[in-house]
Image (cartoon, helix red, strand yellow):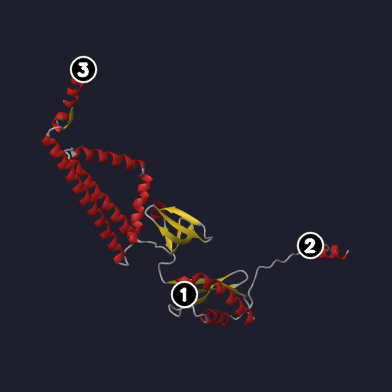
């Protein structure tokens, strides 16, 4: 019995926090303080959660209110602000119960440093994602080329960019690679300059060929009159005279327009009886030796 009494006395005299023992907490005043601190903590928690939600909604609403702002960034900033408010709320609650918050902040800082070193790649993607969203070198729906990947941007998150390539295959590119490489955005400007090279024979009337090429392309409604189209002789090749043609069009029809004009010019030059050279090969055989086609013909006759 004496041993149990001694153990209980030792337990009551055990220091719990700030030099106070358990016996100190079992007094009426101590119980009142505990209840008061608990109620205060509940109020602080309620106010902190409400304020965190309000701040997050307000920041997110700012992104939705202005069409020029990216909602993804403001959603991210709203979540960051919410966690910051909740962190301060947690510190206030600990301070209510007499916990030294300076040591807690030091522990959180050390833990944050360790986590940051362990997640360097993820954090670099996160930082690059913020830069992409802020400066907007590309947006959803743009046709881009990034690090030898060409396709349409389907989604931009804080960690990665999703691209559907020319074969409609999903390509996930980490944002650090997007921000750290050259970005070619074919959709940024409303117009593009299409370019072709058409060859005609040396014996053709170059002025007539130029007229046919120009009239055929400019007759298409997708061709822009301004800036002035460029149709000029550019290269004297071994078997052809090459015209360089440059005409502006809307960016969203560029690829189909470029392909259509190749066919239309070919058909127009055929209709105008303009020679389009193509590679030929002349085989000279020694006298008395049949060429391969002759040998095949003789074999077929036999």
Q: Nearer the viewer, residue 193 or 142?
A: 142
Question: Disc 1 versus disc 2: distance between alpha carbons?
Answer: 50 Å
- Where is 32 relative to 203, above or below? above
Q: Residue at x 38, y 46 (%)?
A: 121
Q: Nearer the viewer, residue 149 or 26?
A: 26
The numbered dot on residue 284 is: none
Q: Nearer the viewer, residue 209 or 114?
A: 114
Residue that badge 2 annotates:
292
Comparing labels 1 and 2, the label whose residue is closer to the camera = 1
Question: Disc 3 versus disc 2: distance between alpha carbons?
Answer: 117 Å
Residue that badge 1 annotates:
249
> In the rendered view of the protein, which quadrant contains the C terminus?
bottom right
Q: Position of residue 41 (x, y in %)?
A: 19, 45
Q: Position of residue 204 (x, y in %)?
A: 62, 79
Label 2: how many Cα within 10 Å (few below 14, some 14–19, many 20+): few
First in sequence: mark 1 vs mark 3: 3
Residue that badge 3 annotates:
3
Query: Residue 182, located in which quarter of the rendered image?
Result: bottom left
Instruction: Give the secondary structure at mark 2.
Output: helix
Q: Nearer the viewer, residue 203 or 151?
A: 151
Q: Residue at x 17, y 30 (%)?
A: 22
Q: Position of residue 273 (x, y in %)?
A: 64, 81
């Amino acid at each position: 019995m004496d041993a149990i009494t001694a153990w209980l006395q030792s337990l009551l005299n055990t220091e719990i926090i700030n030099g106070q023992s358990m016996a100190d907490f079992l007094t009426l005043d101590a119980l009142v303080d505990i209840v008061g601190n608990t109620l205060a903590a509940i109020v602080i928690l309620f106010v902190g959660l409400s304020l965190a939600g309000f701040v997050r909604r307000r920041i997110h609403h700012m992104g939705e209110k202005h069409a020029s702002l990216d909602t993804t960034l403001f959603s991210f900033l709203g979540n960051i602000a919410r966690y910051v408010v909740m962190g301060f709320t947690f510190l206030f609650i600990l301070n209510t119960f007499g916990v030294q918050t300076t040591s807690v902040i030091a522990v959180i800082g050390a833990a944050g440093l360790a986590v940051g070193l362990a997640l360097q790649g993820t954090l670099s993607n996160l930082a690059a994602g913020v830069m992409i969203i802020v400066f907007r070198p590309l947006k959803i729906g743009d046709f881009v080329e990034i690090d030898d990947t060409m396709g349409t941007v389907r989604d931009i998150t804080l960690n990665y960019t999703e691209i559907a390539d020319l074969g409609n295959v999903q390509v996930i590119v980490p944002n650090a690679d997007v921000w750290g490489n050259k970005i070619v955005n074919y959709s940024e400007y409303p117009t593009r300059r299409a370019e072709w090279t058409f060859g005609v024979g040396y014996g053709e009337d170059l002025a007539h060929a130029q007229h046919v090429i120009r009239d055929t392309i400019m007759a298409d409604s997708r061709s822009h009159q301004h800036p002035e189209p460029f149709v000029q002789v550019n290269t004297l090749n071994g078997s052809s005279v090459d015209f360089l043609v440059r005409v502006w069009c809307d960016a969203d029809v560029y690829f189909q327009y470029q392909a259509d004009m190749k066919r239309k010019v070919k058909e127009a030059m055929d209709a105008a009886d303009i020679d389009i050279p193509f590679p030929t090969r002349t085989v000279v055989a020694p006298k008395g030796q049949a060429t391969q086609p002759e040998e095949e013909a003789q074999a077929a006759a036999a």
